[in-house]
Amino acid sequence: MHDDLLLAAPPAGAARPTIGRISGVSIPFRRRTVPLAVTTVAALAAATLSGAGPAQAQDEAPEQIVNGTFDDGHAPWWGTANITLDSSTGQLCTDVPGGTINPWDVIIGQDDVPLVAGETYEYRFFATATPTKVIRALIQLPVDPWTQFMAANPEVSVSGNNYTYTFTAPVDLPNAQVAFQIGGSAEPWRLCLDDVSLRGGAEPEEYVPDTGPRVRVNQVGYLPKGPKNATVVTEATDPLPWQLVDARGRVVASGRSVPYGLDESSGEQVHTIDFGRYTRSGAGYTLVADGETSFPFDIGTSFYERLRADALKFYYTQRSGIEILDSLRPGYGRPAGHVGVAPNSGDTEVPCQPGVCDYTLDVSGGWYDAGDHGKYVVNGGISVYQLMSEYERALRVGGKDKPWLHRDGVLDLPESGNGLPDILDEARWQQEFLLTMQVPAGQPLAGMAHHKIHDAAWTGLPLLPHLDPQLRELHPPSTAATLNLAATAAQAARVFKPYDRAFAERNLRAARTAWAAAKANPQRYADPADANGGGPYDDTDVTDEFYWAAAELYLTTGEREFRDFVLASPHHTGDIFQDRGFGWQWTAPLGRLALATGRSRLPDRHRVQASVVEAADRYLTTIAAHPYGIPYAPDDNRYDWGSNHLVINNAIVVATAFDLTGKDRYRDGVLQAMDYIFGRNALNISYVTGYGTVSAQNQHSRWYARQLNPDLPNPPRGTLAGGPNSSIQDPVAQRFLAGCAPQFCYIDDIESWSTNELTINWNAPLAWIAAFIADQGRCDPHPGHGHH
Ligand code: 9MR
C-alpha cells in the first residue's frame, strides 16, 4: 500500500459528496424530498387548507419564535452574563469570550416556545462566525434533564450559512427553550445570527446514507495469495459481467457475478464476485460491474503491517495520568488527565461512592475506557488481556526472525528503549492501574477489585481529560471485576517474568488474592442501575469469569486446584463459541482459547484444541453462506452494540484454528472478515479511521471531538468504530436510523454513542488480528502451525 493512497484525497469521482452541506449540515447525508403520500398528517392538513403543496404549507405554518429577525432590537432573546447582545446592525451579534470549557458556558436563548406533540417543525437560522466555529443549536426542555428535541452541531463560517433542520416534537410543551450554546473555545470569537425561525407543519426528513458505488470491496486491500471477494447491490437477477481494472485502466481479469438474492443483514438484493484467481500485487485497482466502479484498493501486504502498529498505538492516546507527547503522536499532544490537578478531582486520591468504603485509593494511570473518562476493571481487563495474548501468540509462532511484536521501539512510546517490547510497555500501563483497583488488606472485602472508577455525573462533549471537573468515585467491588483481575494478573505474571521478576511476582500474588476473594464472595454483582456518569458493565453470571481466571492461573502455575476447577467447569466442555461472539460479559471463550494454545499438561488439551477448530468450522460456514462474508449472523438478525469487535473476535477463533492446523481455509476466513470491516459492507464504509477511501472519523469521544470543535483532532489512524447496533439507543441514531436493517444501523456522527464509539476493548481484537494477518504476508507462509 502506498502511503499517499491512504492519506491523500481520493481519486476524482471516488469522493463521497457531502450533499448535506446544501442545508448547512456537515454530516454526509442527503435530505430527500418526501413524496406527498408519506408526509405527516399535520403537513397534509396544512396543504389541504391552503390548497398548495407541502413546501408552501410549511412557510405558512405558524411562526413560533418571537422576533427572529432582529430588525427592532432583540427582546425577548437573552444571553449568559459573560456576553453582551448587540442588535444594532439588524442581526444579533456577540463577542464570545475565550477560556471557557463547556458549550453551555456561553448561551444565547429564547424561552417559552410552544411545541405540540406529533407536530413536525422546521427550524431555520442564518449565522456567521469569525473565525469559523462549531456551535450547538438546540431546542430543549428548559430545566434538568434538558431533554433535547432538536440538536445540531453546525460548523459556522465567516461568510455565513443558512441552516435548516426538521424534527417532530415528542411532547406537548408550552415552554421549550431555543438555545445556541457557544462556549468551550480557548480563544475569543464573534457570532452573528439572523432570521431565526421555527415553523410547525414541516415535512419530516428522511435520512438516506450516501453509500457510494454499489460495487463493494475491501477499500484497503487484499493479500496477493488471499481470497478476493466483493458484493454488488443490484436488482439484476442474472449474473453480471465484471472487470478488474488496474491503476493504468487496463482490464486485468474478468468474469461473472453470482446472484444471491435478498440479504437479510442489509435488506438489499445482492450478487457476489470472486476474483481470487488474480494474484498480482499493485495499487489502485478497481472493480467494475453493473455500470458502477468500486472504490480503489490495493493488492499487497503492507497495510496490515501498518495497521498492527496503528491499532496498538491507539492505546497511547487513551492513557490517563500522563502527558501525551505531540512528538510521539503528532496532533494528539495534551496535558495529563486526572492527576489531582484542578479542575480534575482525581485519580490520585479517589473516595468511594457514599457508604461503599471509608478509604481513598490512588488509581491514577491506566487507559480511559472509550469516549468517556471512566475506567472499568472488567472492560479494561479483557483489553489488556487481548494485548498480552497477541504478544503470547507472537512468542509461539515467532519463527526464525525476532517477531515484530517483541521489539522495543516499534510503537514510539515514552518507554521505548527500556529493553521491554513496546506492546508490554503499553500493557503494563494498564495492568499497573488494574492492580491499584484491588481492595487493600485489612479493609472489608480485601482482595476483591472495585468494579469501576468514573465521574459522579455524565459530562458533555467535547471535554479534554485534564479539564474534567467532576468528582471521581470508586464503585463497589464485584466478583466479575475480581476474577477479571485474577485472570489478567495471572497472565501478566508469566508474560513479564523474563523481563521483570518483581512485577511478575506482584501480579501472581494479586491474582491469588483475587481468586480467593472471589471464591469467598462468588455473587457480588455490579448494580445495573449504577450508570450515572459511567457505564454499568453489569453481569449476573460470572461462572464464565471463574472459568477464565482458573484457566489463566492454571497456565501460569500448573497447580492442581486450578486444573481441577477448569476440568469441572461446565464451560470447559460446553458449546461456548456463540454466533454473537464474545466480549466483557462472556469470557468463557478467552479461557478456552488460552487453554488451546498455552503450554500445559492439561489432560484433555487435544479435545480443547479440537473444540476451537470445530467452532472455526462453524464460523467458516457462516462466512460462506453470507453475501458479505461476515462470520457473524445472529439468529434474530439483530446486531449487538459494538458488533464490529464481535465480528473480529469470531475471526480470532478462526485465526486460532489456523495456528493450530496450518490450514489455509482458516486464514482465508479471517481475511474475509476483514473485508467487511474495511468496506465490503452495505454502507460502503471502512470502520477503521484512516484506512480506505471513506472511513469512520467521528467516533464518539470527548477529546477526539473534531466534529464539535475544529481545533481538536479526529480519532487517530487505526481506531475501530463500534459499528452497526440494531438497538440504536442514542438520540441521533433514533432520529436518523429508525427501522434500520442491521447493517444500516450505524451513523458516523460523534453524538451516536450507541453505534459510533471507540473503546479499548474493540481496538484490542483489531490489533490482535492485524498482527496475525501481517504475519501471513511474510515469506514463511505458515508461521503458525506445528504447536500441538
Ligand atoms: O460496550 C458496552 C456494551 O456492551 C453495553 O451494552 C453498553 C451498555 O451498558 O455499554 C457499552 O460500554 C460503554 C460503557 O458503558 C461506557 N463507556 C463506553 C462504552 C462503549 O460504548
Image (tube, grey):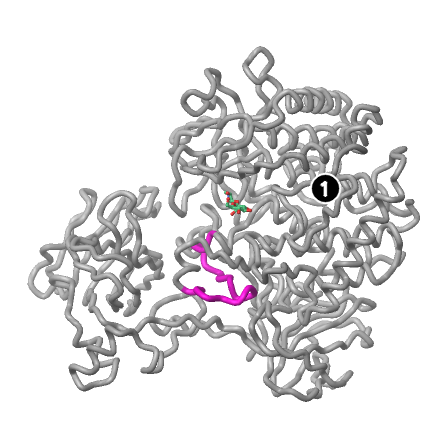
Magenta region includes residue 44: no
Residue 232, image quadrant: bottom right
Q: Quadrant of the N terminus?
A: bottom right
| Crowdedness near tag 1: few (<14), some (14–19) or many (≥20) residues, C-alpha within 10 Å | many
Looking at the picture, how far across and down is residue 758, in whole percent?
54, 50
Label count reads 1
Nearest the viewer among 100 and 123 is: 123
At horizontal 60% and vertical 58% (from top left) the residue drawn is 688
678 left or right of 17? Answer: right
Image coordinates of residue 215 in percent, x first then y, are 63, 78
Residue 292 in view of the camera? yes
Residue name at image x 77 percent, y 41 percent? 592
Q: Which residue is mark 1?
A: 590
Residue 89 visible in this rendered orientation of the protein: no
Front-most of residues 265 and 430: 265
Relative placement, left or right, of 108 versus 719 is left
Instruction: Name the residue at 42% across, 52% down.
Output: 711
Say if 728 sits above or below 289 in the image.
above
User: Left of 328 or right of it: where is 127?
Assistant: left
Q: Secondary structure at mark 1?
A: helix
* Residue positioned most to the top: 442
Residues in magenta?
Answer: 736-753
Question: Secondary structure of the magenta portion, mostly?
Answer: loop
* Image quadrant occupied by the C terminus: top right
Q: Could you tell me residue 21's position as x and y percent?
A: 38, 71
Q: Nearer the viewer, residue 37 or 745?
A: 37
Q: Quadrant of residue 481?
A: top right
